[in-house]
Image (spheres, rainbow, N blue to C red):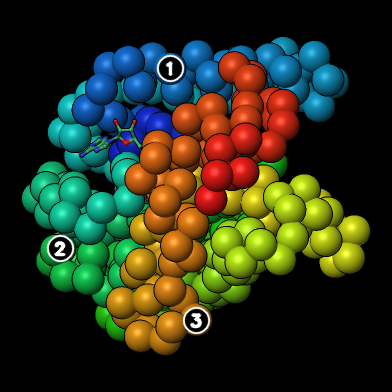
Amino acid sequence: MEIKKIFVVGAGFMGSGIAQVAIQSGFDVTINDQREAALEGAKVNIEKRLTRLVTKGKITEEDKAIAMSHLSTSSSVHSATDADLVIEAIFENLDAKRAVFEQLDKICGRNTIFASNTSSISLTSLAAATSRADRVVGMHFFSPVPAMRLVEVVYGLRTSQETIDTIMSIGDKMNKKMILAKDKPGFIVNRMLLPMLNEAVQILDEDIGSVEDTDEGMKLGCNHPMGPLELADMVGLDILLEVMETFYTDLGDTKYRPAHLLRKMVAAGYLGQKSGAGFYIYDKDRKKVGVNPVLDKH
Ligand SMILES: NC(=O)c1ccc[n+]([C@@H]2O[C@H](COP(=O)([O-])OP(=O)(O)OC[C@H]3O[C@@H](n4cnc5c(N)ncnc54)[C@H](O)[C@@H]3O)[C@@H](O)[C@H]2O)c1
């Protein structure tokens, strides 16, 4: 099936990145959000990022203009009527995502594929909210979307091979490397990564090492580009906690139990970069300025 028109639901951090990559790859994209401010913000941010690419000599002014001509915004889901592909990137909540799919199921054509950028929700249960379970698939982009090559393609129990093949070819057009994962908690990457970040918090909780030494350990000892605690701050400590809770409930093994210190940090409002403080303190440009002194008290 040929995909020309993409409807991206959710103009937040991920949705705007997905829209940018799609318009740069020649797809016509309508980005949708309930909030007008989010739509305006997404458009401004995409334009700014493309301008930066022009300044760096990576694309031309003409490339930028062509890409921007493929972008439109709409606060109405009814603009999805002629979409070939929907990519949902609203916040991580099963009921909210099911409601979006249920509504779009009535609006979109029978052949429209529904993809979700979910990091942790079962594609099989999202598909059950629609009458097109064979055309529901996970398209899990990584952040920041324009810079990260990987997309996990997640297939539910009823996802058809044709849907998987179509999504794989879209990934190729977007110059992404696609990997295939079954619909099991965390898929491939987060199933490995998030327990490691949680374990780094556990190391702090047990006073085995300091914040900086824990991060240096993985950077210099394992060649990771970022330490696990700074990465946890970037992901968001609330998101890390939520996913670990899901792993713990769904997989039932104590190795997935969220670190006690992680619960305390979230309860205290230290959510990482987005709140200005997590394991580190950040300035207004999200630049790290030092270790969070509150950790001396735990
Ligand atoms: N942030 C990451 O690093 C990351 C990485 C991979 C996957 N994801 C997944 O991507 C999704 C989006 O994450 P994000 O960080 O971009 O979130 P975000 O909070 O930046 O953006 C979510 C946007 O969705 C909008 N929205 C909420 N409900 C809506 C609805 N019913 N209809 C239309 N718009 C609606 C909100 O107004 C907001 O603008 C989540 O499922 C998340 O798990 C996030």
Q: Is residue 287 placed above or below 139 in the rendered structure?
A: above
- Seen in the image, is 100 located left or right of residue 146? left
The CA span between labels 1 and 3 is 40 Å
Q: Earlier in the sequence, mark 1 or mark 3?
A: 1
Q: Which residue is mark 2?
A: 130
Disc 3 marks a residue whose amino acid type is: Lys
Report x, y in % for residue 30. 36, 30
Q: Which of the two discs, 2 and 3, sits closer to the camera? A: 3
Report x, y in % for residue 123. 31, 69
The numbered mark at residue 255 is: 3
Quarter-wise, where is residue 51 in the image? Answer: top right
- Seen in the image, is 6 located left or right of residue 181? left
Residue occupying image coordinates x 19% and y 34%: 77
Q: Is residue 264 placed above or below 255 in the rendered structure?
A: above
Tell me whether the residue at label 1 lies in contact with that at label 2, contact meaning CB atoms closer than 8 angstroms. Answer: no
Q: Which of the two discs, 1 and 3, sits closer to the camera? A: 3
Decide: few, some or many residues near mark 2? Use Cα within 10 Å; few <14, some 14-19, many ≥20.
many
Q: Is the residue marked 1 within 8 Å of ligand 1, measured from its CB? A: no
Towards the viewer: 210 or 93:
210
Q: Which of the two discs, 1 and 2, sits closer to the camera? A: 1
